[in-house]
Image (cartoon, rainbow, N blue to C red):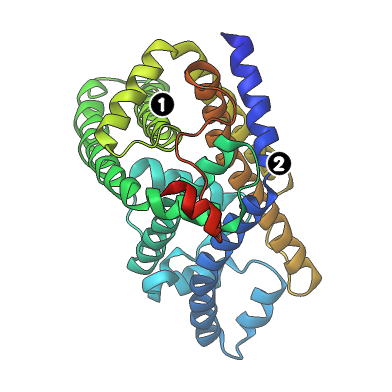
Amino acid sequence: MGGIGVSAIGDGIRRVNGAPAILVGVWILTLAAGLPLAAALRVSLADHLGQSLAADTAASGANYDWMQEFADQASGIGVTFKPTVIGFGAVLDNLSAFIDGTARPIAIVATASLYVLAWIFLAGGIVDRFARDRAIGAHGFFAACGVFFFRFLRLAVVQWLVYAFLFGYLHGWLFGTFYPRITHEMNVERSAFLTRLALYFVFGLLVAAAALVFDYAKIRAVVEDRRSMLGAIGAALGFIRRNAVSAVGVFAANFLLFGVVVGVYALGAPGAGGAGPAMWVGFAIGQLYVVGRLWVKLVFWASETALFQSRLAHAGYVARPVPVWPDSPAAEAIRS
């Protein structure tokens, strides 16, 4: 079981590295999604700073007093500009917001929704490419994206319902009702902290379990050309149940890989630098972290695909034939 899991991770890394265009494409998508928000925030900061002395200190480093003043009067995306956006603090801030379901400005929610929609569109082509483990060309890639887009939209509805329950109801009950109840008579702060940490761990396991099921639902839908997403979810649950050790092992190894990427960034994350070359160095380091994070996400899908094919299919097997463009008259005659 363990050997198969390690083999799937190695195979997944090989498949991702063998399709660099996908990694470059999703990085460009991520960068493009963030640029309009960055431009809007830049305008807000420039309007507030003007030609003041605070502008000079802000350009040479972090001016926390001015940041607090700006945050007090900011609206929209401007409310996100605070000391936690500097360096590794941004990672922790996003993690905290994700776990606790912190509300974000409408501009960020709208951009994130479009970004998720783009990933739903690309998911079919990405998994199809990793499953075939060979180049399929732009036509084959985007044909797979189109075929599975509406299927994955239906799957996304189920995902939304599950995550709405987890973050909308269960999270509130765990930390708003259950946690105060069991810590009501605790006199030791450390005990209350450990209790809260344990609840976060349980909640995280449930979120991870949901993500694992939906990952394999996508993989089974693509590899087996399934049209029913409820059927794909049921098949994913069956596969995970029969291969629990390997499936959980591959997921845990991928999560550890993600932890390594985050840890490396934590060690090298830039602080509040000044304008000029230091600013661009910080930007480059941040983008390297984004690329690493996206690479891990792709390795998740590729290694899970490799594990599934090693158990219920064979490497490179996908039920749906690759469309050929342009179709020759001979091919059309053979089909008819």
> Which mark identifies residue 83?
none
Residue 251 vertical position relative to residue 61 in the rendered view, above or below: above
Amino acid type, label 1: Leu
Counting from the top left corner in percent of width and height, residue 330 is at: 55, 54
- Label 2, residues with CA under 10 Å away: few <14, some 14-19, many ≥20: some
* Location of mark 1 (residue): 197
Counting from the top left corner in percent of width and height, residue 196 is at: 36, 27
State which quadrant residue 85 falls in: bottom right
Amino acid type, label 2: Asn
Counting from the top left corner in percent of width and height, residue 218 is at: 40, 37
Residue in view at x 41 percent, y 26 percent: 197
State which quadrant residue 53 falls in: bottom right
The residue lying furthest to the top in this view is 1
Q: Nearer the viewer, residue 108 or 292?
A: 292
Left or right placement of residue 148 versus residue 299 in this view: left
Left or right placement of residue 237 versus residue 300 in this view: left
> Which mark identifies residue 17?
2
The residue lying furthest to the right in this view is 277
Q: Is residue 148 visible?
A: yes
Instruction: Name the quadrant of the N terminus.
Output: top right
Count of number-bearing discs: 2
Nearer the observer, disc 1 or disc 2? 2
Q: CA distance from mark 1 to mark 2?
A: 36 Å
Residue 255 vertical position relative to residue 326 in the rendered view, above or below: above
Tag 2 secondary structure: helix
Residue in view at x 48 percent, y 81 percent: 44
Counting from the top left corner in percent of width and height, residue 110 is at: 35, 65
Q: Is residue 171 visible?
A: no
Residue in view at x 41 percent, y 59 percent: 112
Residue in view at x 60 percent, y 88 percent: 52
Residue 301 vertical position relative to residue 139 in the rendered view, above or below: above
